[in-house]
């Protein structure tokens, strides 16, 4: 069966008295070739920074610009003398933002696409020359602009960043391109299980009218409103709301604090928003539990997405226990949902849960999600139900709680050691009037939790039966294939 002639390889060796060989390569003296080579300048190695909340607080300077913008500065030696900066601008109020949400979103997207005497490409090229990495994200309620840049280029990069914030030209061609990008994205997402499920759950029970910055459009509305938007509305939003006086700035890295304060004052200290500001509240609201099934024809994957809204703030006494309960249940790498649904039964490509609580008001969301094959929908939901029921009935174990505490504390420590994460935390603290001592207090409470407290929080709050959820996928084809 195997030793057949068609599989045979035959070779013939022909000996010769004087074989012709390739000459040996000449020896090369590299000394004169590298005589004038100097190499790159040595890279600054930075310091062994202690990321404890107490040390961060001790080394952070807090100040304000002339217009009231809050500033946090943390000088520290970093590898390559890198500086991380974050600016946060805050706009408007529940009243004066009505009907302007899409214009605000477009303004944030277009900031870096043109300023006087510079095109989008020239802005990008200049940032590249400065070895700066800018990032922008925002909507009608605010903007976050971040920058990672070597110390020697900080001033030039910050000036360019601020120029894009203060003097965008909103070119018609760039606006038209953005318009088409957003329409194309909405048309694509309306056919995708993930986009459809998430959008539907966010819309269910949403109490706000269209035009309110908290309203959630469906994809048809998204497409129609982007088509109707005009660049003049975007320009008007920028002129009417942008300014730094209600915002925050934070810098972490190899900085001269005095020089940075002077630079920030020069660039932002007199830039004020013309509109009154009051944070748009986002209180929790009650929605009757339900699940919707959405068909997405010819899609190989399906999506489950669920949300339980809770009247809880991150200052509540039960929050540390609930945070840990969720971590054990669905966030950690060894979580119960992952162990059962991904590892044991192989039903999902990605599964988990997350808990997010507002620092502003009692408003939290417990989110569950899974990506799966449509034919596994019933098995997946059965596994979800059984794991939540088992957790409520049996609770967690001492070992799970101990390992969960250690994992959470290590992850938070590692996050504080990453300057992009740390600068964002410092900016948030400036808005909230907090210091890193708040983080330490949370971790102390988490470390002190007893098993009974974690199980009590789980049973009190995390009732999967009260979840609002959606599954999206090609379930008709999966049913017909059986």
Image (cartoon, rainbow, N blue to C red):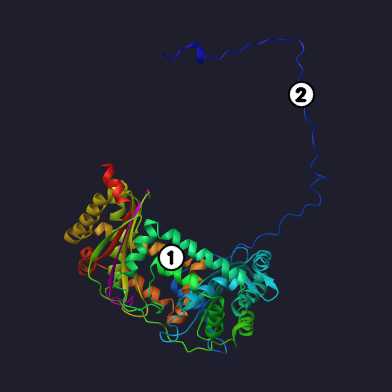
User: Which sits in the foreground, 124 or 87?
Assistant: 124
User: Which sits in the foreground, 109 or 340?
Assistant: 109
Residue 204, quarter of picture: bottom left
* Whole-percent x, y for residue 363 in the image: 32, 76
* Whole-percent x, y for residue 265 in the image: 61, 85
Q: Which mark is residue 459?
A: none
* Whole-percent x, y for residue 419 in the image: 52, 67
Q: Work out whether residue 158 can be spotted.
A: yes
Label 1: which residue?
413
Helix, strand or loop at label 2? It is loop
Instruction: Report the number of numbered marks.
Output: 2
Magenta residues (range): 300-317
Query: Would residue 150 be found to the left or right of residue 222 on screen?
Result: right
* Whole-percent x, y for residue 251 in the image: 56, 75
Q: Which mark is residue 22?
A: 2
Residue 309 lies in magenta, yes or no?
A: yes
Mark 2 closeness class: few <14, some 14–19, many ≥20 residues within 10 Å: few
């Amino acid at each position: 069966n195997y030793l057949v002639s068609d599989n045979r390889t035959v070779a013939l060796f022909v000996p010769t008295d004087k074989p012709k060989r390739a000459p040996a390569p000449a020896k090369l003296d590299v000394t004169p070739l590298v005589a004038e080579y100097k190499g790159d300048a040595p890279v600054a190695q930075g310091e062994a920074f202690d990321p404890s909340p107490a040390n961060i607080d001790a080394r952070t300077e807090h100040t304000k610009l002339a217009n009231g913008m809050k500033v946090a500065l943390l000088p520290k030696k970093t590898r390559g003398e890198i500086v991380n900066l974050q600016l946060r601008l805050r706009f408007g109020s529940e009243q004066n933002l009505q009907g302007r949400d899409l214009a605000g979103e477009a303004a944030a997207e277009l900031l870096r696409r043109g300023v006087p005497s510079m095109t989008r490409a020239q802005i990008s090229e200049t940032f590249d020359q400065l070895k700066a990495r800018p990032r922008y994200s925002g909507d009608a309620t605010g903007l976050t602009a971040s920058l990672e840049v070597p110390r020697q280029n900080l001033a030039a990069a910050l000036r360019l960043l601020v120029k894009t914030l203060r003097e965008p030209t909103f070119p018609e061609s760039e606006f038209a391109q953005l318009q088409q990008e957003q329409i194309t994205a909405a048309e694509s997402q309306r056919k995708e299980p993930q986009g459809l499920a998430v959008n539907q759950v966010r819309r269910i029970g949403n109490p706000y009218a269209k035009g309110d910055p908290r309203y959630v459009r469906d994809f048809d509305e998204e497409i129609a409103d982007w088509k109707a938007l005009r660049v003049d509305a975007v320009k008007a939003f920028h002129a009417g709301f942008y300014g730094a006086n209600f915002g925050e700035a934070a810098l972490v890295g190899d900085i001269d604090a005095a020089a940075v304060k002077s630079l920030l004052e020069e660039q932002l200290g007199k830039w004020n928003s013309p509109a009154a500001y009051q944070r748009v509240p986002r209180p929790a609201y009650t929605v009757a539990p339900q699940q919707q099934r959405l068909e997405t024809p010819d899609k190989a994957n399906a999506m489950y997405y669920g949300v339980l809204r809770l009247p809880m703030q991150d200052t509540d006494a039960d929050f540390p226990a609930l945070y840990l309960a969720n971590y054990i249940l669905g966030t950690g790498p060894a979580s119960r949902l992952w162990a059962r649904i991904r590892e044991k039964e192989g039903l999902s490509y990605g599964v988990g849960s997350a808990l997010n609580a507002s620092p502003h008001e009692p408003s939290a969301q417990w989110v569950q999600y899974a990506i799966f094959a449509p034919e596994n929908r019933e098995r997946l939901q059965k596994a979800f139900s059984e794991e939540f029921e088992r957790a409520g009935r049996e609770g967690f174990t001492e070992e799970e709680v101990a390992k969960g505490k250690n994992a959470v504390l290590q992850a938070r420590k590692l996050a504080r050691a990453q300057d992009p994460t740390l600068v964002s935390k410092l900016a948030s603290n400036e808005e909230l009037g907090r210091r890193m001592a708040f983080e330490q207090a949370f971790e102390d409470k988490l470390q002190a939790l007893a098993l009974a407290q974690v199980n009590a929080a789980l049973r009190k709050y995390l009732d999967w039966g009260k979840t609002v959820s959606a599954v999206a996928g090609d379930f008709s084809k999966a049913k017909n294939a059986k």
